[in-house]
Image (spheres, rainbow, N blue to C red):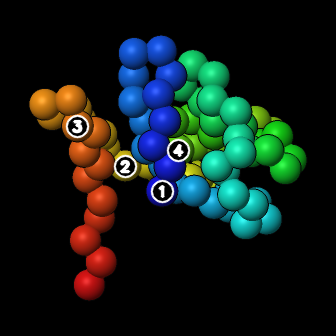
Amino acid sequence: ILIMRSGSEVFSCGAICPHQGVSMGEGWVFDDEITCPEHSWVFSLRDGSLTWPGSGTRIPIYPVRISGGIVEVDLPVEP
């Protein structure tokens, strides 16, 4: 997973672009979006939706909260 801050907000998302499996860790964050460093696909950090170049795929988004100055990420429980 990735954890990032944009302005005063903190976001968490999956670390791999669904397009070709590239790490999003070198991507660019601007406002509430992250851009894949390989092919410039842009995803919303609010709901994971692809905002450019179209639609139909997503990245996982994980709820984040700050508690006592510590970033906590709510990860899904896998069976």
Q: Would you say the residues marked 1 and 2 are in contact, meaning their CB atoms lie under 8 Å apart? A: yes
Q: Which residue is mark 4?
A: 48
Q: Residues within 10 Å of mark 4 (few under 14, many from 20)?
A: many
Numbered disc 4: secondary structure: loop
Q: Quadrant of the C terminus?
A: bottom left
Residue most extreme to the front: 69
* Residue at x 47% of width, y 28% of height: 5
- Camera-near label (1 vs 2) is 1
Q: Would you say the residues marked 2 and 4 are in contact, meaning their CB atoms lie under 8 Å apart? A: no
Vertical comparison of 65 with 77: above or below: above
> Is 48 situated left or right of 35 in this image?
left
Q: Residues within 10 Å of mark 2 (few under 14, many from 20)?
A: many
Q: Earlier in the sequence, mark 1 or mark 3?
A: 1
- Label 3 and label 2: CA atoms lie apart by 16 Å
Using the image, tell me which numbered label, if any, was put on residue 1.
Answer: 1
Q: Which residue is mark 3?
A: 70
Q: Is residue 25 visible?
A: yes
Q: Earlier in the sequence, mark 3 or mark 2?
A: 2
